[in-house]
Image: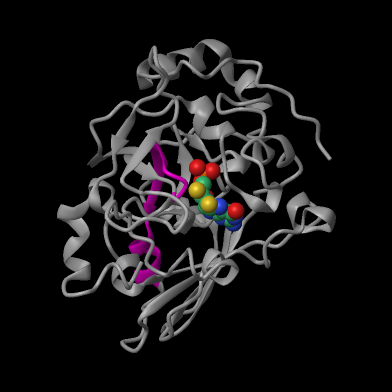
Amino acid sequence: MPVYRPPKIAASEITPRQVYLGRREFLGAAAIGAVGLLGAGNAGAAALSAVESKYKVDEKPTPVKDVTTYNNFYEFGLDKGDPVALSGDFKPLPWTIKVDGMVNKPGTFDLDALMKEFPIESRTYRMRCVEAWSMVIPWDGFPLASLLSKVEPLGSAKYVAFETVVRPEEMPGQKGIFQSLEWPYVEGLRLDEANHPLTLLAVGLYGETLPNQNGAPIRLVVPWKYGFKGIKSIVRITLTDKEPKNTWQITNPQEYGFYANVNPAVDHPRWSQATERRIGESGFFGASRRPTLPFNGYADEVASLYAGMDLKANF
Ligand code: MTE
């Protein structure tokens, strides 16, 4: 089990990208290769060349230290600090993703090749966790729709199912006394949600390849849904005509549903979803809570996907 070594560089105060990139140049490639600016879990960090995207919320990004040290990734343990501390043995490269099911052209795709084929976009999304906290994260990635169009879904395909890798030797949460969930971790989207331009396959954050704790080397990001929909370390994507189950729904169907759209009007059975705590923000009296927005602020883009649906029944 790896011992957690704090990053040599205090990356917590990074805000403007210019400052961040300037500091990277100053430190030189060797330092980046050894540790990476994103923290100890990102030993193989590499800079990404990303194009700016129109999808950028105008809010202050959450400090990179919070984004990379306050995580949910049960394959590495139950506590928020476990993923950064216990993911050092995980090897995200080389990586392939199998895309199969109801498609004309199933295939197993090498991630490096996909990253050359599809332009990597830099997008800043507001993220809302079901536990009523939120972050603003500068992701780098390409639309899931780009990969799906490559395999040509059949007209009968209605849903997309996702699976995380199973590697108990590298993921301590998948073995022994830390056993918590059923593996593999699974997730699902309706095909129209999957094809929505906001739905991203992220391969990086803050301009570098994803740290292990954030779902290296590739994870889903669906910014209008609760964060648990963002399945990490994806190895398989299957097109299907049946609504796929997700891990939290399997674990606790009373509390977690298929849609998981951010909805301040539908409380979690054990707490309100009306407000949220923005991680990394603190004031004299501590962080103030802000109101949660329907569809996490993305209603203009996505509300039409759910026209006519009862969003209390389809939580
Ligand atoms: N994916 C896998 N494979 N395993 C997990 O435990 N946790 C989910 C989601 N994806 C999880 C996962 C939850 S509950 C959240 S809130 C987000 O990842 C957290 O993503 P972050 O750590 O990058 O903020």
In this rendered view, identify the residue nearer to me: 151 or 64. 64
Point out residue 237 in the picture as x, y percentages from the top left corner. Answer: 50, 70
Write the residue at 43% across / 80% down. Answer: 243
| In the depicted structure, whether residue 301 falls above or below residue 16 | below
Write the residue at 40% across / 53% down. Answer: 226
Q: Which residues are magenta?
A: 130-150
Q: Is residue 223 magenta?
A: no
| In the depicted structure, whether residue 219 falls above or below residue 280 | below
Task: Residue 163: name its quadrant.
Answer: bottom right
Point out residue 51 in the picture as x, y percentages from the top left corner. Answer: 31, 38
Write the residue at 49% across / 78% down. Answer: 106
Residue 209 in view here: yes
In this rendered view, identify the residue nearer to me: 46 or 307. 307
| In the depicted structure, whether residue 44 falls above or below residue 170 | above
Q: Is residue 141 magenta?
A: yes
Q: Residue furthest front?
A: 270
Write the residue at 32% across / 41% down. Answer: 275
Residue 46 in view here: no
| Left or right of 189 on screen, residue 174 | right
| Left or right of 40 on screen, residue 237 | left
Q: Quadrant of the C terminus?
A: bottom left
In this rendered view, identify the residue nearer to me: 187 or 266. 266
Point out residue 306 in the picture as x, y percentages from the top left corner. Answer: 22, 69
